[in-house]
Amino acid sequence: MGWPSRVADPQPSPAPVGERYPQLLRAGGVRWWQPLLGLLLAGVTLVSGAVAVILASVVVAALTGAAEDPFSDEALSPDSPLGLLANNLVIAVMVPASVLAVLVAHRRPAGLLASVTGRARWGWLGRMLALAAVVVVVFFAGSFLLPSSVTSDVDVPPTGTLVALFAVILLTTPLQAAAEEVGFRGYLSQAVSSWFAHPLTGTLVAGAVSALLFALAHGTQDVWLFGDRLAFGAVASWLVWRTGGLEAAVALHVVNNMASLGFTAATGSLEASLTASTLEWQFAVTDVAMMATFAVLVDRVTRRRPVAVRRDPTRDVLIGHRAVGYPGARPSTPPPAGGAKPWGMG
């Protein structure tokens, strides 16, 4: 009988491919009731937090004498620093509401709301903010050249009020804009997508639901304003899918809101801007062109300097549990016994 021949190890199988951002809550298994529980928990948290913020603002208005009647609409008008602060903080409650839903209902790390890496990629966010600033400023400046049938009087607020408004915009508008992305493009999209086994179907349905609810959340509006907001939701969803995280969508949202609120604060039209229900078609078209331009540029930047767009499948998927990981690709089947070392010695 001859010596056992040396059997070559089989070729290693490709490393498993991780999920894209919309499917992150589906990794490791999901039960049909978890997204329902999460959405309910997030909704209750959002309402409770909003009520707490409004009550606190009313108390502050009463103590500071900011308004004769702290319970009136004028007391928390967005044209006032306190009213704008309350408006931004109410929306900011979306962040803890989403985090609580992910932790409690899905038992996943809250960092999955930020990106496929499980954390915010701050360097990438900085590059996206710089790119968004250039695109938004160019289109925003160009919009002043468009003809308009609407005229509005400029009523510059007193210096103290204007400085306070700018401070509120600078400090809390980034949080407000980021919170909307965490809520709509983050948890809502991931929760809806987790119901679908097919990634493409889940991504498309989640993107459509997110964009539609985002537009509807802004209240009564004409077809052009609704279409503008619907387009923003769709573009933001694509940015999240394309880059594997919320950073690019947050950057566009933050810069757009700061530019808009900064201008309307300086002209005394903050409340009119935040409660607007109509938009002329030429401004809607320009706005959509701005979003599309930013998306194209982000795609080109991502091709030149790739970022992670899929979750590492060896990372932990449940709180308190970690998936088994291997330093390299694992063979699909073990080598035949006695192949490489016939005597069984180490």
Image: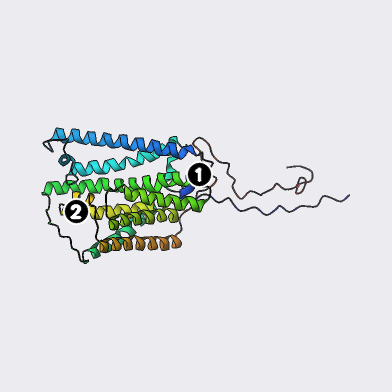
- Dot placed on the residue nearer the N-terminal end, 1 or 2: 1
Total numbered labels: 2
Counting from the top left corner in percent of width and height, residue 9 is at: 71, 52
Q: Quadrant of residue 84?
A: top left
Numbered circle sitting on residue 170: none
- Horizontal arrangement in the rendering, residue 207 relative to residue 7 (left or right): left
Q: Position of residue 197 (x, y in %)?
A: 53, 47
The residue labelled by disc 2 is 264
SS class of the residue under badge 2? helix
Give me the residue at 33% from left, 38% from top: 46
Instruction: Say which quadrant the C terminus sits in.
Output: top right
Q: Nearer the viewer, residue 93 or 209?
A: 209
Label 2, residues with CA under 10 Å away: few <14, some 14-19, many ≥20: many
Residue at x 87% of width, y 51% of height: 2
Can I make out residue 277 in this image?
A: yes
Q: Nearer the viewer, residue 66 or 345?
A: 66
Horizontal side, residue 174 vs residue 195: left or right? left
x and y percentages locating residue 37 in the rendered image: 43, 36
- State the residue at coordinates (75%, 42%): 345
Label 1 to label 2, Cα distance in Å? 42 Å
The colouring scheme, among rainbow, by chain, secondary structure or one colour, is: rainbow
Q: Furthest-right residue in view?
A: 1
Residue 111 is left or right of residue 256, and the answer is right
Question: Mark 1 falls on what kind of element?
Answer: helix
In the displayed structure, does residue 323 sit left or right of residue 232?
right
Q: Amino acid at mark 2?
A: Thr
* Residue 114 at x, y percent in the picture: 41, 46
Where is mark 1, residue-wise? Answer: 26
Residue contact between numbered discs 1 and 2, judged by CB atoms under 8 Å: no
Residue density around tag 1, few if under 14, some if 14–19, many if 20 or more, within 10 Å:
many
Q: Amino acid at mark 1?
A: Arg
Q: Which residue occupies 24% across, 58% down?
A: 279
